[in-house]
Image: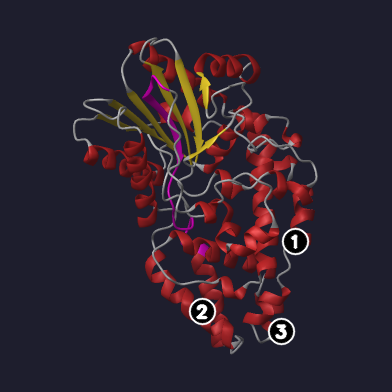
Amino acid sequence: MTIKILLSAIVFGCASLFAQTTKEEIFTDLNKAGGVYYAYPVTESLNTAPPKGYKPFYISHYGRHGSRYLISDRDYKWVIDLLHKADKENALTPLGKDVMTRLDSLYIETEKRGGDLSPLGVRQHRGIAERMFRAYPEVFKGETEVSARSTIVVRCVLSMDAFVERLKELNPKLRTTRESSDRYMNYLNYHSDESNAYTTKEWKEQYRKFEKSHVNPDRLVKSLFSDPKFIETQVNPESLMWALYYIAVGMQDVETQLSFYDIFTPQELFDIWQCFNYRFYVCDSNFPGNRGLLLDNAKPLLRNIIASADECIASGKTGVTLRFGHDGNLIPLAGILRLKDCYNQEENPADFYKAFSDFKIAPMAGNIQMIFFRNDKNPEDILVKFMLNEREISIPVKTDIFPFYRWQDVKSFYQTKVLPD
């Protein structure tokens, strides 16, 4: 197995994938200001050959659904309706009229597709599946069993289907199962009552103040509307800026060449992204103030990962376990696994983005893979490596053969240091 240097390394940052995020990084690629709307950037996987005598035999995976449309038709429609109302009252600037025309064109594609997986989302998962198959052909030989389970949300089900279908095209002999059921939601998408109580209320006042200082819509609104009275009586500037932000960053996930970045300054996009990123850090990751409640949501999933791996190891066979869910599952999993720079703690909201960047962990179709390797001469000698978005990544367990770790050391670390309540 050769080391493949990524064609997309410059864009995604192969060597400095988890280096501190900077304003300049966002300015250089405005798509990253989309946070979890960042379209999956990987086009080629990076894999280090295992030590001599070890061969891959099992893959454990958790993936976020692929690129999607905005959650609801209303996310587009209320902005369109507002601009058309302003147009009838001669309250739009030339730029406002242009944006209205662009939105009308966009809505032809997005109408009735709120929350749906986009064609790009399908291609993303087919690509990840093919790269996995090509990188570890030993795992996918013959009639290997591939177990795939998804949350009950349709875009996740279709992501699973796209992934598994590509594997079946590459090897029709694979024995695959595809399931989506409430039966598996207790680990695929678990949220405790305590964490729900926290995310519903506790953090919001401090966030409100942060957002107020970072979302400054006056320039944007005045560039679109020519009538101050219309703005005063009809426009909620903050709501409109947020709505246009979501539309603008969401363009990378749908089948259109339209762009709305021109109505923002790079600084405005960076500031809004900081607010968006703030929410994911506080409500999904290792922010000190959430008392570990959000990472604890990934404990059932980690237990399933360990049990599934041990089952395949004990069988002596090859196998693949695929799981499909959401950013709110992938981010806590990356944290509880202690993947490098996915477990950082920061108390100052102004510095959250330096410790945590949502687009680096959970872009559309983001995924975590654990690849297991068996020693030909000693079947009980098992190595594992971790990959985040198809990049090898470290965990805080001692090893002299990085990116590989001894499974017994890894399992012991999680069972003794992470999983106990």
394 and 209: which is toward the camera: 394
Which residue is tagged 2?
A: 100
* Residue in the picture at 60% in, 85% down: 92
Q: Earlier in the sequence, mark 2 or mark 3?
A: 2
Q: Earlier in the sequence, mark 3 or mark 1?
A: 1
* Residue in the picture at 61% in, 63% down: 28
> Could you tell me residue 45's position as x and y percent?
43, 43
Q: Secondary structure at mark 3?
A: helix
286 and 312: which is toward the camera: 312
> Could you tell me residue 184's position as x and y percent?
42, 28
Q: Nearer the viewer, mark 2 or mark 3?
A: 2
Which residue type does callout 3 highlight? Pro
Q: Nearer the viewer, mark 3 or mark 1?
A: 1
Q: Nearer the viewer, mark 2 or mark 1?
A: 1
Q: Which mark is residue 228?
A: 3
Q: In whole angstroms, how far apart are the C-alphas of marks 2 and 1?
A: 26 Å
